[in-house]
Amino acid sequence: MTNKTIGIVIFILVIITGIFAFMNRNLVKDKSEALHNAEIIIKQGENETKIGFDDIKELGEVEFYATLDTSTTDPKDYKYTGVPLINILKKLEIDTENKKQLIVRGIDGYTVAFSIDEVVDEDNIYLVYKMEGKLLKSKEEGGSGPYQLIVRKDQFSQRWCKFVVEMEVR
Ligand SMILES: Nc1nc2c(c(=O)[nH]1)N[C@H]1C(S)=C(S)[C@@H](COP(=O)(O)O)O[C@H]1N2
Ligand SMILES: [Mo]
């Protein structure tokens, strides 16, 4: 082989290694997001639709602080990342007029209810997927996610439904 041929072979190998490194980088990223691509079911009468993380995170992501206050812990502020709940209903074209309530359920059967007046308030109820900048873990992993409701205007945290899997407009 001439020096020129060796040069070309090395060049090609370097390019291939680079391509693999690049593909791998994207795979790692895809994997952590895919693990999080849980869906929420939204019911309205006979109709049932679903929405997943890829769509949810495009609905006006905000970061904010809210005070977690439970019966066993002192009030503490945490940074949450999520979207206003009303944006999800708007995106799915779910009509809130002539409706009274929104019911939200967690995977453990925990259920909370909101009046439609509370639901249309853009700065009260958020569907959150990060706490302190990290994706919420599932119930099995010891977290409160992958989705959790945060109700900023509630004094206590009873209605902060953890492990949200289903919502229903009535
Ligand atoms: N899915 C689900 N969400 C829930 C609960 C629950 O048992 N299941 N407990 C509620 C109560 S009473 C409080 S105070 C807050 C925070 O509870 P934690 O401190 O036990 O996480 O979550 C609320 N959301
Ligand atoms: Mo509680």
Image: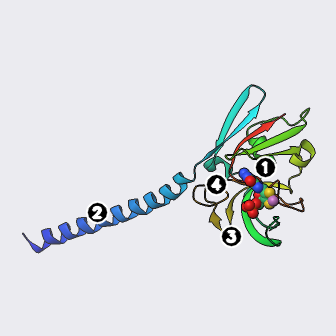
| Image coordinates for residue 144, horizontal then vertical, percent | 67, 58
User: Mark 3 falls on what kind of element?
Assistant: loop
Q: Earlier in the sequence, mark 4 or mark 3?
A: 3
The quadrant in which residue 5 appears is: bottom left
Residues at circles 2 and 1 in contact by the CB criterion of under 8 Å: no
Q: Which of marks 2 and 3 is in front?
A: 3
Element type at marker 4?
Answer: loop
Whichever of labels 2 and 4 marks the residue nearer the N terminus, that label is 2
Residue depicted at 64% across the width and 60% down the height: 143
| Residue 102 percent location from the top left of the image | 83, 41
Front of the two marks 2 and 1: 1
Amino acid at circle 3: Glu
Tell me how far mark 2 sits from mark 3, CA to CA. 38 Å
Say which amino acid is labelled 2: Ile
SS class, disc 1: helix
Q: Quadrant of residue 135?
A: bottom right
Would residue 107 be seen by someone viewing this image from the given angle?
A: yes
The residue that disc 3 covers is: 132
- Which mark sits nearer the N-terminus, 1 or 4? 1
Q: Distance between the residues labelled 1 and 4?
A: 15 Å
Q: Tag on residue 95?
A: none
Badge 4 is on which residue?
Answer: 146
Q: How crowded is mark 4: few (under 14 residues within 10 Å), some or many (20 or more)?
A: many
Which quarter of the frame holds ligand 1?
A: bottom right
Residue 35 is left or right of residue 13, and the answer is: right
**Residue on which disc 1 sits:** 85
Give the residue number, with chain letter if any, for mark 2.
16
